[in-house]
Image: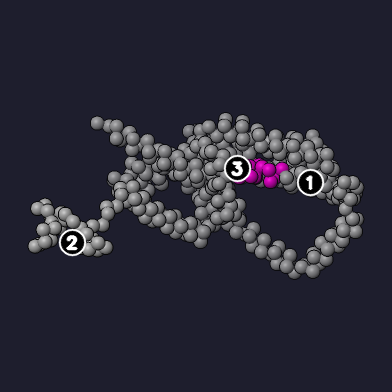
Amino acid sequence: MPAAVPATGLSAPDGRIRDPERAFGARGWHPWLMPPVSASLRTAASYAWRLLVVGAAVYVVFMVLGRFHEIAVALFLGLVITALLSSPTRQLARVVPRSLAVAVCLIGSTALLLGVLALVGEAVAGESTTLVREFRQGLASIEEWLERPPLRLNPRALSGFQDRVGDYLSTHRSTLLDTALSGAGRVVEVLTVLALAVFSSVFFLHGGNRQWSWFCEQLPASARAHVSVAGQAAWRTFTGYTHGIVLVAATNAVLVGVALYFLGVPLAVPLALLEFFAAFVPLVGSPVALAVAAVVALAAKGPLIAGLVVLLIVVIGQIEGHLLHPLVMSWAVRLHPLVVAISVIAGAIAAGVVGAVVAVPMVSVAWSVHSALREARAGTADEP
C-alpha cells in the first residue's frame, strides 16, 4: 500500500489520496495515479509477443530448410514414397520377410515408372515427324487467320516477328548454351535428390514405426503422449492426402488423354502425363497443363479443336472440384478452397514449384495436428 501523504489531511486512513489535484498539482503526475491497463489490452499484448516469438521460430526454420532444401525435398519425397508403398509392403510382408517385401515394392514401382516414361518417349519419337509437319501447317493457318477479319494484322509484322526471334536465338547462342549447361547441373541435383529419397524410403518402409518410437522415447515423459497423438494424426492425414491426390491426378490424366486422343491432338500421352504431374498443385496445375495442350491443339489442329480443349479445362475443373475432391479426399483434411489457393500462392512465392506442391499437404497436416491435440486436451479435461 502506498504511504499516506503526511501533515496535509489529503490522505484517507487506508492510504488512498482524497484529492489528487491538491496533492500533486492540477497537472501533476505520480505512478500511483496511472490508470489501470485493461484486461483486453494485457491479453492482446501477451498474445502479440508470443506470436512474435513463434513467427521468429518459423522464420528460422524456413531459413534452415531453404539452406538445405535438397535434403528437405528428398525427405518429403521419401515420405511420399512411403505413404504410397506402405500398404502393399505391409500386405506382402505377411507372406515374405519384411526386407524382401520392401525390395519387391520399390523395384516393382521403379520398373513401372520407367516403363511409363519409356512409353511416353516412344510416343514422342513416333510422332515427331508428323508433329513437326502439323506444327508448320498450323502456324501457317494461324497466321492466315490473324491476317483475316476481324483482326487484320499486317503480314509484315508477323514475318518481322519471326525474323526477330531468329536474330535473338543467333545473337544469344552462348547464353542459351550456358543455360543448357546449368540445366545439366540441375539434372544432376535432381538425380541426387531422387536417390536420397529412395534411400530414405527404404528405412521408412522397413522400420518407420521403430524410428518413431525411438524418437518419442527421447522426449520428456510429459510430452510423449501429445507428440504421439500429433504424429499419428499427421501421418494419417499425410497418407490420406497422398493417396487422394494421386488418385485425382490419375483420373484427370486418363480423362485428358482420352479426350485429346479422340480430338486428334498430337502427343496425347505426353500431355496426359503432364496433366498427371500438374494435378499435384491443386487449383492451378490442371489449368496450366491443359493450357499447354490447348496451344498444341491450336498449332496442330486449328482454333476449333483448341476451343474444345479450352472447354475441357472447364469440365475437368468442375469434375475435380465438385466430384473428385469431395469423394476421394474425404479421409484427409478438407480445406476451404480459399485456404488452398492462399497456401498454393504462398508456397509458390516462398519456394517456387516445390513450395506450391508442398504447401497444401503441410497446411493439411498442421490443421490435423491442431485438431487432434485439441480433442486430446478436451478428453483429458472431461476425465474425473
Q: Which residue is mark 1?
A: 296
Q: Is residue 382 visible?
A: yes
Tell which of 319 and 71 is nearer to you.
319
The reply, left or right, for residue 180 in relation to residue 302 is left
Which amino acid, mark 3? Pro
Q: Position of residue 178 (x, y in %)?
A: 70, 67
Q: Is residue 296 magenta?
A: no
Q: Which residue is mark 3?
A: 282
Q: Is residue 278 magenta?
A: yes
Image mark for residue 23: 2
User: Taken as a whole, is the magenta stretch helix, strand or loop?
Assistant: helix
Please name the residue shown 88% across and 53% down the image.
Answer: 153
Secondary structure beneath label 1? helix
Tell which of 61 and 161 is nearer to you.
161
Q: Residues within 10 Å of mark 1 (few under 14, many from 20)?
A: many
Q: Position of residue 114 (x, y in %)?
A: 66, 46
Secondary structure beneath label 2? helix
The reply, left or right, for residue 272 in relation to residue 374 is right
As measured in the structure, the alpha-carbon distance from the residue carrying label 2 to the one carrying label 1 is: 88 Å
Q: How is the image coloured?
A: one colour
The mark nearer the N terminus, 2 or 3, is 2
Which amino acid, mark 2? Ala
Compared to residue 167, the image places residue 361 above or below, namely: above
Which amino acid, mark 1? Val
Residue range in magenta is 276-290
